[in-house]
Image (spheres, rainbow, N blue to C red):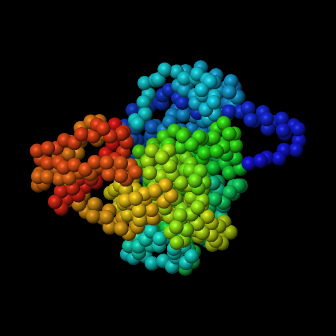
Amino acid sequence: MIKKIGLLVILCFHFNAIAQEDAWVYLVDKENVQASIANPITILTQKAIDRKSMHSVSIDERDVPVNENYIIQLKAQTGITVLAKSKWFNAIHVRGLQVDISALINLSFVNEIIYADNNLNSKTVISKPKSDFKFESARTTYNYGNALNQIQMFNGDDLHIANYTGAGMTVAVIDAGFPGVDNIAGFSHVRDAGNILGTYDFVARDVDVYTNTTSNHGTLVLSDMAGFVQDNFVGTAPDAEYYLFITEDAPNENPVEESYWVEAVERADSLGVDVVNTSLGYKSYDNANYSHSDADLDGLTTYISKGANIAFEKGMLMVTSAGNSGASGIAAPGDAPGSFTIAAVNANSNYASFSSQGSNIQLTQKPDVAAQGQASYVISQNNNISTANGTSFSSPIMAGGIVCLWQALPNLNNAEIMQLVRESASQFNNPDYLLGYGIPDLSLALNQGLSVENFTAIDTNLIVFPNPVNNELNVHLPSTYEVGNITLYNILGKKVLESQVSQANRKVNVSHFSKGVYLLKVEADGFLKTLKLIIN
Protein backbone atom coordinates (compact mmCIF):
# COMPACT_ATOMS: atom_id res chain seq x y z
CA MET A 1 0.00 0.00 0.00
CA ILE A 2 1.36 3.42 -0.97
CA LYS A 3 0.45 6.29 1.31
CA LYS A 4 0.65 9.88 0.04
CA ILE A 5 1.65 12.35 2.74
CA GLY A 6 1.89 16.00 1.90
CA LEU A 7 3.05 17.89 4.95
CA LEU A 8 6.60 17.73 6.24
CA VAL A 9 5.45 17.44 9.83
CA ILE A 10 3.32 14.42 8.92
CA LEU A 11 6.19 12.95 6.93
CA CYS A 12 8.48 13.24 9.95
CA PHE A 13 5.88 11.54 12.10
CA HIS A 14 5.59 8.76 9.54
CA PHE A 15 9.34 8.08 9.65
CA ASN A 16 9.21 8.05 13.42
CA ALA A 17 6.44 5.45 13.28
CA ILE A 18 8.60 3.28 11.05
CA ALA A 19 11.10 3.07 13.93
CA GLN A 20 8.44 1.41 16.03
CA GLU A 21 8.86 -2.37 16.23
CA ASP A 22 6.41 -5.18 16.93
CA ALA A 23 7.31 -8.03 19.24
CA TRP A 24 5.86 -10.85 21.31
CA VAL A 25 6.70 -10.80 25.01
CA TYR A 26 6.46 -14.28 26.54
CA LEU A 27 5.68 -14.44 30.26
CA VAL A 28 7.12 -16.80 32.86
CA ASP A 29 3.98 -18.06 34.55
CA LYS A 30 0.28 -17.68 35.29
CA GLU A 31 -1.64 -17.39 38.53
CA ASN A 32 -4.06 -19.86 40.09
CA VAL A 33 -3.35 -22.48 37.41
CA GLN A 34 -4.26 -25.64 39.34
CA ALA A 35 -7.29 -24.05 40.98
CA SER A 36 -8.57 -22.86 37.60
CA ILE A 37 -8.13 -26.28 35.98
CA ALA A 38 -9.84 -27.94 38.95
CA ASN A 39 -12.79 -25.54 38.61
CA PRO A 40 -12.91 -24.85 34.85
CA ILE A 41 -16.21 -22.98 34.93
CA THR A 42 -14.18 -20.03 36.27
CA ILE A 43 -12.27 -19.78 32.97
CA LEU A 44 -14.53 -21.41 30.35
CA THR A 45 -18.21 -21.47 29.51
CA GLN A 46 -20.19 -24.63 30.21
CA LYS A 47 -20.59 -25.19 26.47
CA ALA A 48 -16.81 -25.13 26.06
CA ILE A 49 -16.38 -27.58 28.94
CA ASP A 50 -19.03 -29.90 27.48
CA ARG A 51 -17.46 -29.82 23.99
CA LYS A 52 -14.02 -30.63 25.37
CA SER A 53 -15.44 -33.46 27.49
CA MET A 54 -17.37 -34.97 24.57
CA HIS A 55 -14.27 -35.07 22.37
CA SER A 56 -11.76 -35.98 25.12
CA VAL A 57 -9.93 -32.64 24.91
CA SER A 58 -8.02 -31.89 28.07
CA ILE A 59 -8.32 -28.61 29.96
CA ASP A 60 -4.79 -27.45 30.73
CA GLU A 61 -2.59 -24.46 31.55
CA ARG A 62 -3.22 -22.93 28.15
CA ASP A 63 -6.86 -22.37 29.06
CA VAL A 64 -5.92 -20.22 32.05
CA PRO A 65 -5.96 -16.46 31.27
CA VAL A 66 -2.85 -14.30 31.16
CA ASN A 67 -2.00 -12.63 34.46
CA GLU A 68 -3.68 -9.22 34.13
CA ASN A 69 -1.29 -7.69 36.64
CA TYR A 70 1.58 -8.44 34.25
CA ILE A 71 -0.29 -6.66 31.45
CA ILE A 72 -0.83 -3.62 33.66
CA GLN A 73 2.88 -3.49 34.42
CA LEU A 74 3.81 -3.80 30.74
CA LYS A 75 1.47 -0.94 29.85
CA ALA A 76 3.25 1.22 32.43
CA GLN A 77 6.68 0.74 30.84
CA THR A 78 8.27 3.60 28.90
CA GLY A 79 7.34 3.69 25.23
CA ILE A 80 5.38 0.42 25.27
CA THR A 81 1.95 -0.06 23.70
CA VAL A 82 0.15 -3.33 24.44
CA LEU A 83 -1.86 -4.46 21.41
CA ALA A 84 -2.94 -8.05 22.03
CA LYS A 85 -2.58 -10.99 24.37
CA SER A 86 -2.63 -14.78 24.11
CA LYS A 87 -3.38 -17.19 26.92
CA TRP A 88 -2.33 -20.17 24.77
CA PHE A 89 1.15 -18.74 24.27
CA ASN A 90 1.16 -16.79 27.56
CA ALA A 91 2.38 -13.90 25.43
CA ILE A 92 1.68 -10.20 24.89
CA HIS A 93 2.01 -8.42 21.54
CA VAL A 94 3.68 -5.04 22.10
CA ARG A 95 4.83 -2.13 19.95
CA GLY A 96 7.57 0.37 20.71
CA LEU A 97 11.15 1.39 20.03
CA GLN A 98 13.59 -1.50 20.02
CA VAL A 99 15.45 -0.13 23.03
CA ASP A 100 12.23 0.07 25.06
CA ILE A 101 11.09 -3.41 24.06
CA SER A 102 14.47 -4.96 24.84
CA ALA A 103 14.38 -3.36 28.30
CA LEU A 104 11.32 -5.47 29.14
CA ILE A 105 13.53 -8.52 29.64
CA ASN A 106 14.58 -6.97 32.96
CA LEU A 107 11.07 -7.44 34.34
CA SER A 108 10.92 -10.49 36.56
CA PHE A 109 7.82 -11.90 34.86
CA VAL A 110 9.18 -11.66 31.27
CA ASN A 111 10.74 -14.88 29.99
CA GLU A 112 11.53 -14.13 26.35
CA ILE A 113 11.04 -11.50 23.65
CA ILE A 114 10.69 -12.35 19.96
CA TYR A 115 10.58 -9.56 17.37
CA ALA A 116 8.34 -9.70 14.30
CA ASP A 117 11.43 -8.59 12.38
CA ASN A 118 13.61 -11.71 12.40
CA ASN A 119 16.69 -9.60 11.68
CA LEU A 120 16.40 -8.19 15.18
CA ASN A 121 16.09 -11.62 16.75
CA SER A 122 19.41 -12.68 15.24
CA LYS A 123 21.13 -9.63 16.66
CA THR A 124 19.50 -9.35 20.05
CA VAL A 125 19.84 -11.72 22.98
CA ILE A 126 16.63 -11.29 24.96
CA SER A 127 15.81 -14.51 26.71
CA LYS A 128 16.12 -16.01 30.16
CA PRO A 129 16.57 -19.60 31.32
CA LYS A 130 13.35 -21.54 30.87
CA SER A 131 10.90 -21.36 33.75
CA ASP A 132 9.08 -24.33 35.24
CA PHE A 133 5.91 -23.28 33.45
CA LYS A 134 5.20 -25.71 30.60
CA PHE A 135 2.60 -25.88 27.82
CA GLU A 136 1.24 -29.30 26.92
CA SER A 137 2.07 -29.54 23.92
CA ALA A 138 -38.07 -33.62 9.64
CA ARG A 139 -37.02 -32.69 6.11
CA THR A 140 -35.94 -29.28 5.02
CA THR A 141 -36.43 -28.17 1.43
CA TYR A 142 -34.96 -24.92 0.14
CA ASN A 143 -35.04 -23.03 -3.12
CA TYR A 144 -31.39 -22.03 -3.28
CA GLY A 145 -31.76 -19.73 -6.26
CA ASN A 146 -28.37 -18.61 -7.51
CA ALA A 147 -26.59 -20.34 -4.62
CA LEU A 148 -27.67 -23.83 -5.74
CA ASN A 149 -24.51 -24.83 -7.61
CA GLN A 150 -22.10 -23.93 -4.82
CA ILE A 151 -23.79 -26.23 -2.28
CA GLN A 152 -24.90 -28.92 -4.72
CA MET A 153 -21.29 -29.33 -5.88
CA PHE A 154 -20.47 -31.22 -2.65
CA ASN A 155 -24.03 -32.52 -1.99
CA GLY A 156 -24.49 -30.26 0.99
CA ASP A 157 -28.13 -29.88 -0.02
CA ASP A 158 -28.62 -33.56 0.83
CA LEU A 159 -27.72 -32.77 4.43
CA HIS A 160 -30.26 -29.94 4.45
CA ILE A 161 -32.93 -32.31 3.12
CA ALA A 162 -32.11 -34.64 6.02
CA ASN A 163 -32.71 -31.64 8.34
CA TYR A 164 -29.05 -30.99 9.11
CA THR A 165 -28.87 -27.24 8.65
CA GLY A 166 -26.41 -26.34 11.40
CA ALA A 167 -28.84 -26.10 14.32
CA GLY A 168 -27.08 -26.39 17.67
CA MET A 169 -23.63 -25.84 16.14
CA THR A 170 -21.57 -22.73 16.92
CA VAL A 171 -19.34 -21.01 14.39
CA ALA A 172 -16.86 -18.17 14.80
CA VAL A 173 -16.27 -16.06 11.71
CA ILE A 174 -12.93 -14.25 12.00
CA ASP A 175 -12.67 -11.58 9.35
CA ALA A 176 -12.84 -7.86 8.54
CA GLY A 177 -16.03 -5.75 8.82
CA PHE A 178 -19.64 -6.99 8.88
CA PRO A 179 -21.65 -3.91 7.72
CA GLY A 180 -25.30 -4.61 7.04
CA VAL A 181 -25.47 -7.86 8.99
CA ASP A 182 -27.33 -6.04 11.76
CA ASN A 183 -30.10 -4.66 9.54
CA ILE A 184 -30.42 -5.98 5.97
CA ALA A 185 -33.04 -8.55 5.01
CA GLY A 186 -30.50 -11.13 3.85
CA PHE A 187 -29.51 -11.73 7.47
CA SER A 188 -32.93 -11.39 9.09
CA HIS A 189 -33.22 -15.18 9.35
CA VAL A 190 -30.12 -15.50 11.55
CA ARG A 191 -30.96 -12.33 13.53
CA ASP A 192 -34.59 -13.24 14.19
CA ALA A 193 -33.55 -16.67 15.48
CA GLY A 194 -31.16 -15.01 17.94
CA ASN A 195 -28.31 -16.89 16.34
CA ILE A 196 -25.74 -14.09 16.38
CA LEU A 197 -24.45 -14.87 19.84
CA GLY A 198 -21.82 -12.17 20.14
CA THR A 199 -19.46 -9.79 18.37
CA TYR A 200 -16.08 -8.24 19.03
CA ASP A 201 -13.63 -6.06 17.15
CA PHE A 202 -10.15 -7.00 18.39
CA VAL A 203 -8.62 -4.09 16.45
CA ALA A 204 -10.82 -1.30 17.84
CA ARG A 205 -11.44 -3.12 21.13
CA ASP A 206 -15.22 -2.80 21.13
CA VAL A 207 -18.25 -4.91 20.29
CA ASP A 208 -19.31 -2.94 17.19
CA VAL A 209 -18.47 -4.94 14.07
CA TYR A 210 -21.13 -3.31 11.89
CA THR A 211 -20.23 0.39 11.61
CA ASN A 212 -17.07 2.43 11.06
CA THR A 213 -15.48 -0.52 9.25
CA THR A 214 -13.20 -0.17 6.27
CA SER A 215 -14.26 -3.46 4.69
CA ASN A 216 -17.42 -5.44 3.94
CA HIS A 217 -15.44 -8.66 3.50
CA GLY A 218 -16.89 -10.30 6.61
CA THR A 219 -20.43 -9.62 5.39
CA LEU A 220 -19.80 -11.41 2.10
CA VAL A 221 -18.11 -14.32 3.85
CA LEU A 222 -20.84 -14.74 6.47
CA SER A 223 -23.55 -14.67 3.79
CA ASP A 224 -22.24 -17.91 2.30
CA MET A 225 -22.99 -19.65 5.59
CA ALA A 226 -25.81 -17.72 7.26
CA GLY A 227 -27.46 -15.73 4.48
CA PHE A 228 -31.10 -16.40 3.53
CA VAL A 229 -33.31 -14.76 0.92
CA GLN A 230 -36.54 -16.66 0.28
CA ASP A 231 -36.41 -18.52 -3.07
CA ASN A 232 -33.21 -16.71 -4.06
CA PHE A 233 -30.34 -17.56 -1.71
CA VAL A 234 -29.54 -20.00 1.11
CA GLY A 235 -26.22 -20.24 2.94
CA THR A 236 -24.70 -23.61 3.66
CA ALA A 237 -25.41 -23.51 7.44
CA PRO A 238 -28.44 -21.22 7.80
CA ASP A 239 -29.48 -22.41 11.26
CA ALA A 240 -26.10 -22.42 13.01
CA GLU A 241 -25.17 -19.94 15.74
CA TYR A 242 -22.46 -17.39 15.04
CA TYR A 243 -19.88 -15.21 16.73
CA LEU A 244 -18.54 -12.39 14.55
CA PHE A 245 -14.96 -11.28 15.23
CA ILE A 246 -12.85 -8.64 13.50
CA THR A 247 -9.09 -9.23 13.56
CA GLU A 248 -8.15 -7.71 10.20
CA ASP A 249 -7.00 -4.08 10.26
CA ALA A 250 -8.02 -3.63 6.63
CA PRO A 251 -5.99 -0.52 5.63
CA ASN A 252 -2.72 -1.98 6.93
CA GLU A 253 -0.75 -5.20 6.91
CA ASN A 254 1.06 -5.74 10.20
CA PRO A 255 1.87 -8.90 12.19
CA VAL A 256 -0.28 -7.66 15.07
CA GLU A 257 -3.18 -9.02 13.00
CA GLU A 258 -1.81 -12.50 13.68
CA SER A 259 -1.98 -11.73 17.40
CA TYR A 260 -5.52 -10.39 17.12
CA TRP A 261 -6.46 -13.62 15.36
CA VAL A 262 -4.96 -15.81 18.09
CA GLU A 263 -6.88 -13.82 20.69
CA ALA A 264 -10.06 -14.38 18.73
CA VAL A 265 -9.66 -18.16 18.45
CA GLU A 266 -8.82 -18.33 22.15
CA ARG A 267 -12.07 -16.53 22.89
CA ALA A 268 -13.89 -18.84 20.48
CA ASP A 269 -12.54 -21.86 22.34
CA SER A 270 -13.62 -20.41 25.68
CA LEU A 271 -17.12 -19.85 24.31
CA GLY A 272 -17.51 -23.43 23.11
CA VAL A 273 -17.26 -22.73 19.38
CA ASP A 274 -17.21 -25.83 17.19
CA VAL A 275 -16.02 -24.48 13.83
CA VAL A 276 -13.95 -21.40 12.96
CA ASN A 277 -13.91 -19.92 9.47
CA THR A 278 -10.88 -17.82 8.52
CA SER A 279 -10.93 -16.15 5.12
CA LEU A 280 -7.67 -14.32 5.83
CA GLY A 281 -4.05 -15.08 5.06
CA TYR A 282 -0.68 -13.57 5.95
CA LYS A 283 2.68 -13.59 4.21
CA SER A 284 3.73 -10.07 3.16
CA TYR A 285 3.59 -6.99 5.39
CA ASP A 286 3.92 -3.23 4.83
CA ASN A 287 7.27 -3.45 6.59
CA ALA A 288 9.12 -6.01 4.48
CA ASN A 289 11.25 -7.02 7.47
CA TYR A 290 8.13 -8.52 9.03
CA SER A 291 7.18 -10.58 5.96
CA HIS A 292 7.34 -14.37 6.07
CA SER A 293 9.71 -16.25 3.81
CA ASP A 294 8.52 -19.27 1.85
CA ALA A 295 10.37 -21.48 4.32
CA ASP A 296 8.36 -19.96 7.19
CA LEU A 297 5.16 -21.35 5.67
CA ASP A 298 5.73 -24.93 6.83
CA GLY A 299 2.70 -24.87 9.13
CA LEU A 300 4.75 -24.78 12.33
CA THR A 301 6.67 -21.50 12.25
CA THR A 302 4.44 -18.42 12.09
CA TYR A 303 2.65 -17.18 15.18
CA ILE A 304 -0.80 -17.51 13.61
CA SER A 305 -0.19 -21.05 12.32
CA LYS A 306 1.08 -22.19 15.71
CA GLY A 307 -2.15 -20.75 17.11
CA ALA A 308 -4.21 -22.67 14.55
CA ASN A 309 -2.52 -25.91 15.58
CA ILE A 310 -3.33 -25.30 19.25
CA ALA A 311 -6.94 -24.49 18.29
CA PHE A 312 -7.12 -27.86 16.54
CA GLU A 313 -5.70 -29.58 19.64
CA LYS A 314 -8.39 -27.83 21.66
CA GLY A 315 -11.05 -29.59 19.59
CA MET A 316 -12.18 -26.88 17.19
CA LEU A 317 -12.33 -27.45 13.44
CA MET A 318 -10.42 -24.66 11.70
CA VAL A 319 -11.63 -24.06 8.12
CA THR A 320 -9.25 -21.72 6.30
CA SER A 321 -9.03 -20.23 2.83
CA ALA A 322 -6.00 -21.29 0.80
CA GLY A 323 -5.45 -17.75 -0.50
CA ASN A 324 -5.53 -16.05 -3.88
CA SER A 325 -1.85 -16.10 -4.81
CA GLY A 326 -1.81 -18.94 -7.34
CA ALA A 327 1.65 -20.43 -7.79
CA SER A 328 3.09 -18.04 -5.19
CA GLY A 329 1.75 -20.42 -2.58
CA ILE A 330 -0.42 -20.76 0.51
CA ALA A 331 -0.13 -18.19 3.30
CA ALA A 332 -0.52 -18.60 7.06
CA PRO A 333 -2.59 -20.01 8.74
CA GLY A 334 -3.63 -22.08 5.70
CA ASP A 335 -0.25 -23.84 5.90
CA ALA A 336 -0.95 -25.25 9.37
CA PRO A 337 -1.63 -28.97 9.85
CA GLY A 338 -4.42 -27.90 12.20
CA SER A 339 -6.13 -25.88 9.45
CA PHE A 340 -8.55 -27.52 7.03
CA THR A 341 -7.51 -25.51 3.99
CA ILE A 342 -9.91 -24.87 1.11
CA ALA A 343 -8.93 -24.23 -2.52
CA ALA A 344 -11.20 -22.66 -5.14
CA VAL A 345 -12.80 -24.06 -8.29
CA ASN A 346 -15.19 -22.52 -10.80
CA ALA A 347 -18.82 -23.47 -11.31
CA ASN A 348 -17.73 -26.43 -13.46
CA SER A 349 -15.51 -27.82 -10.68
CA ASN A 350 -12.29 -26.83 -12.45
CA TYR A 351 -9.29 -25.27 -10.68
CA ALA A 352 -9.54 -21.46 -10.39
CA SER A 353 -6.22 -19.97 -11.53
CA PHE A 354 -5.98 -17.55 -8.57
CA SER A 355 -6.31 -20.29 -5.92
CA SER A 356 -3.09 -20.60 -3.89
CA GLN A 357 -1.19 -23.79 -4.51
CA GLY A 358 0.40 -26.01 -1.93
CA SER A 359 3.97 -27.27 -2.09
CA ASN A 360 6.43 -29.55 -0.36
CA ILE A 361 7.23 -26.67 2.00
CA GLN A 362 4.08 -27.60 3.90
CA LEU A 363 4.56 -30.65 6.06
CA THR A 364 1.04 -31.88 5.34
CA GLN A 365 -1.07 -32.02 2.18
CA LYS A 366 -2.23 -28.51 1.28
CA PRO A 367 -4.78 -27.56 0.24
CA ASP A 368 -7.04 -30.15 1.85
CA VAL A 369 -10.12 -29.95 -0.39
CA ALA A 370 -11.84 -27.52 -2.76
CA ALA A 371 -15.18 -25.75 -3.22
CA GLN A 372 -16.58 -23.08 -5.52
CA GLY A 373 -14.67 -19.83 -5.15
CA GLN A 374 -14.92 -18.37 -8.64
CA ALA A 375 -18.18 -16.54 -9.31
CA SER A 376 -19.47 -17.54 -5.86
CA TYR A 377 -22.78 -15.97 -4.98
CA VAL A 378 -22.84 -13.69 -1.92
CA ILE A 379 -25.08 -11.11 -0.25
CA SER A 380 -23.59 -7.61 -0.03
CA GLN A 381 -24.16 -5.02 2.71
CA ASN A 382 -26.74 -3.42 0.40
CA ASN A 383 -28.75 -6.65 0.35
CA ASN A 384 -27.81 -7.33 -3.26
CA ILE A 385 -27.10 -10.88 -4.43
CA SER A 386 -23.98 -10.78 -6.59
CA THR A 387 -20.88 -12.80 -7.41
CA ALA A 388 -17.38 -12.59 -5.94
CA ASN A 389 -14.10 -14.40 -6.58
CA GLY A 390 -11.69 -15.82 -4.03
CA THR A 391 -10.92 -18.65 -1.66
CA SER A 392 -12.44 -16.22 0.83
CA PHE A 393 -15.75 -17.68 -0.35
CA SER A 394 -14.88 -21.30 -1.07
CA SER A 395 -13.86 -21.51 2.60
CA PRO A 396 -17.19 -20.46 4.21
CA ILE A 397 -19.19 -22.37 1.59
CA MET A 398 -17.35 -25.52 2.63
CA ALA A 399 -17.30 -24.57 6.33
CA GLY A 400 -21.09 -24.41 6.42
CA GLY A 401 -21.33 -27.85 4.86
CA ILE A 402 -18.92 -29.25 7.45
CA VAL A 403 -20.96 -27.63 10.23
CA CYS A 404 -24.04 -29.53 9.02
CA LEU A 405 -22.06 -32.78 8.74
CA TRP A 406 -20.80 -32.42 12.32
CA GLN A 407 -24.34 -31.67 13.50
CA ALA A 408 -25.33 -35.05 12.04
CA LEU A 409 -22.34 -36.83 13.63
CA PRO A 410 -21.95 -35.17 17.05
CA ASN A 411 -19.98 -38.02 18.62
CA LEU A 412 -17.09 -37.67 16.20
CA ASN A 413 -14.23 -35.29 16.92
CA ASN A 414 -12.72 -32.63 14.67
CA ALA A 415 -10.01 -34.91 13.27
CA GLU A 416 -12.55 -37.62 12.43
CA ILE A 417 -14.85 -35.15 10.67
CA MET A 418 -11.96 -33.80 8.59
CA GLN A 419 -10.90 -37.31 7.66
CA LEU A 420 -14.43 -38.24 6.55
CA VAL A 421 -14.55 -35.16 4.32
CA ARG A 422 -11.14 -35.97 2.81
CA GLU A 423 -12.04 -39.60 2.15
CA SER A 424 -15.24 -38.53 0.39
CA ALA A 425 -13.41 -36.19 -1.98
CA SER A 426 -13.03 -36.70 -5.72
CA GLN A 427 -9.29 -37.37 -5.82
CA PHE A 428 -8.64 -38.81 -2.38
CA ASN A 429 -6.32 -41.48 -3.76
CA ASN A 430 -4.33 -39.00 -5.85
CA PRO A 431 -4.17 -35.57 -4.14
CA ASP A 432 -2.31 -32.66 -5.71
CA TYR A 433 -1.21 -29.13 -4.86
CA LEU A 434 -4.11 -27.50 -6.75
CA LEU A 435 -7.24 -29.06 -5.22
CA GLY A 436 -5.80 -31.27 -2.50
CA TYR A 437 -8.03 -34.31 -2.16
CA GLY A 438 -10.54 -32.70 -4.50
CA ILE A 439 -14.21 -31.80 -4.14
CA PRO A 440 -15.91 -33.62 -1.25
CA ASP A 441 -19.20 -35.50 -1.30
CA LEU A 442 -20.77 -34.70 2.07
CA SER A 443 -23.64 -37.10 1.48
CA LEU A 444 -21.11 -39.92 1.17
CA ALA A 445 -19.23 -38.62 4.21
CA LEU A 446 -22.45 -38.65 6.23
CA ASN A 447 -23.24 -42.24 5.30
CA GLN A 448 -19.72 -43.33 6.16
CA GLY A 449 -19.84 -41.43 9.43
CA LEU A 450 -23.17 -42.93 10.45
CA SER A 451 -21.76 -46.42 9.98
CA VAL A 452 -18.82 -45.53 12.22
CA GLU A 453 -21.14 -44.10 14.88
CA ASN A 454 -23.44 -47.14 14.81
CA PHE A 455 -20.58 -49.58 15.32
CA THR A 456 -19.09 -47.37 18.01
CA ALA A 457 -22.34 -47.47 19.96
CA ILE A 458 -22.14 -51.28 20.16
CA ASP A 459 -18.66 -51.28 21.67
CA THR A 460 -18.07 -50.99 25.37
CA ASN A 461 -14.97 -53.15 25.79
CA LEU A 462 -12.34 -51.96 23.31
CA ILE A 463 -9.32 -50.66 25.25
CA VAL A 464 -6.54 -48.65 23.60
CA PHE A 465 -3.72 -47.35 25.80
CA PRO A 466 -1.66 -45.34 26.52
CA ASN A 467 -3.00 -42.29 24.72
CA PRO A 468 -0.84 -40.21 24.22
CA VAL A 469 1.64 -42.96 23.37
CA ASN A 470 5.43 -42.81 23.05
CA ASN A 471 6.60 -46.21 21.82
CA GLU A 472 4.23 -49.13 22.21
CA LEU A 473 0.46 -49.06 21.81
CA ASN A 474 -1.77 -51.69 23.40
CA VAL A 475 -4.98 -52.60 21.59
CA HIS A 476 -7.29 -54.90 23.57
CA LEU A 477 -10.18 -56.09 21.41
CA PRO A 478 -13.59 -56.83 22.94
CA SER A 479 -13.58 -60.41 24.24
CA THR A 480 -15.96 -61.60 21.51
CA TYR A 481 -13.35 -60.91 18.81
CA GLU A 482 -10.24 -63.06 18.45
CA VAL A 483 -8.57 -61.11 15.63
CA GLY A 484 -8.86 -57.56 14.29
CA ASN A 485 -7.15 -55.15 11.94
CA ILE A 486 -5.87 -51.69 12.78
CA THR A 487 -5.18 -48.85 10.36
CA LEU A 488 -3.39 -45.64 11.32
CA TYR A 489 -3.87 -42.39 9.37
CA ASN A 490 -1.80 -39.25 9.81
CA ILE A 491 -3.30 -35.77 10.03
CA LEU A 492 -3.29 -35.33 6.26
CA GLY A 493 -5.40 -38.44 5.84
CA LYS A 494 -2.76 -40.82 4.47
CA LYS A 495 -2.52 -44.40 5.65
CA VAL A 496 0.78 -44.87 7.51
CA LEU A 497 0.25 -48.25 9.17
CA GLU A 498 -1.85 -51.35 8.64
CA SER A 499 -1.46 -54.24 11.04
CA GLN A 500 -3.27 -57.10 12.76
CA VAL A 501 -3.94 -57.50 16.46
CA SER A 502 -5.39 -60.40 18.41
CA GLN A 503 -6.14 -61.49 21.92
CA ALA A 504 -2.68 -63.09 21.97
CA ASN A 505 -0.80 -60.23 20.27
CA ARG A 506 -2.06 -56.84 21.45
CA LYS A 507 1.04 -54.65 21.04
CA VAL A 508 1.82 -52.28 18.16
CA ASN A 509 5.13 -50.45 17.78
CA VAL A 510 4.60 -46.76 16.90
CA SER A 511 8.01 -45.43 18.01
CA HIS A 512 9.09 -44.63 14.44
CA PHE A 513 6.21 -42.23 13.75
CA SER A 514 6.53 -38.45 14.05
CA LYS A 515 4.86 -36.66 16.93
CA GLY A 516 1.33 -35.52 16.21
CA VAL A 517 -2.36 -36.37 15.98
CA TYR A 518 -3.42 -39.54 14.16
CA LEU A 519 -6.64 -41.44 13.52
CA LEU A 520 -6.71 -45.08 14.59
CA LYS A 521 -9.30 -47.34 12.97
CA VAL A 522 -9.94 -50.71 14.65
CA GLU A 523 -11.93 -53.29 12.68
CA ALA A 524 -13.07 -56.84 13.33
CA ASP A 525 -15.90 -58.97 11.97
CA GLY A 526 -18.90 -56.60 12.10
CA PHE A 527 -17.08 -54.19 14.41
CA LEU A 528 -15.57 -50.78 13.66
CA LYS A 529 -14.28 -47.97 15.85
CA THR A 530 -12.28 -44.86 14.96
CA LEU A 531 -10.55 -42.75 17.58
CA LYS A 532 -7.99 -39.96 17.85
CA LEU A 533 -4.49 -41.07 18.85
CA ILE A 534 -1.69 -38.74 19.94
CA ILE A 535 1.91 -39.88 19.45
CA ASN A 536 4.50 -38.06 21.59
In the picture shown, does residue 384 fall above or below 112?
below
- Of 158 and 31, the residue lying toward us: 158
Q: What is the quadrant of residue 22 in the picture?
A: top right
In the picture shown, does residue 327 fall above or below 301?
below
- Of 105 and 291, the residue lying toward us: 291
Spot occupied by residue 392 in the image (x, y as percentages of width and height): 58, 59
Position of 470 with respect to 22 (left or right) is: left
Residue visible at 23% across and 58% down? 528
Residue visible at 65% across and 67% down? 380
Spot occupied by residue 10 in the image (x, y as percentages of width and height): 84, 39
In the picture shown, does residue 376 fall above or below 531?
below
Residue most toward the right? 7
Residue visible at 51% across and 75% down? 148
Q: Quadrant of the C terminus?
A: top left
Spot occupied by residue 370 in the image (x, y as percentages of width and height): 49, 61
Residue visible at 55% across and 47% down? 332
Spot occupied by residue 393 in the image (x, y as percentages of width and height): 56, 62
Asked whether residue 109 is in view, the answer is no
Q: What is the quadrant of residue 186 in the picture?
A: bottom right
Position of 15 with respect to 521 (left or right) is: right
Asked whether residue 425 is in view, the answer is yes
Count of number-bearing discs: 0
In the picture shown, does residue 354 fall above or below 502?
below
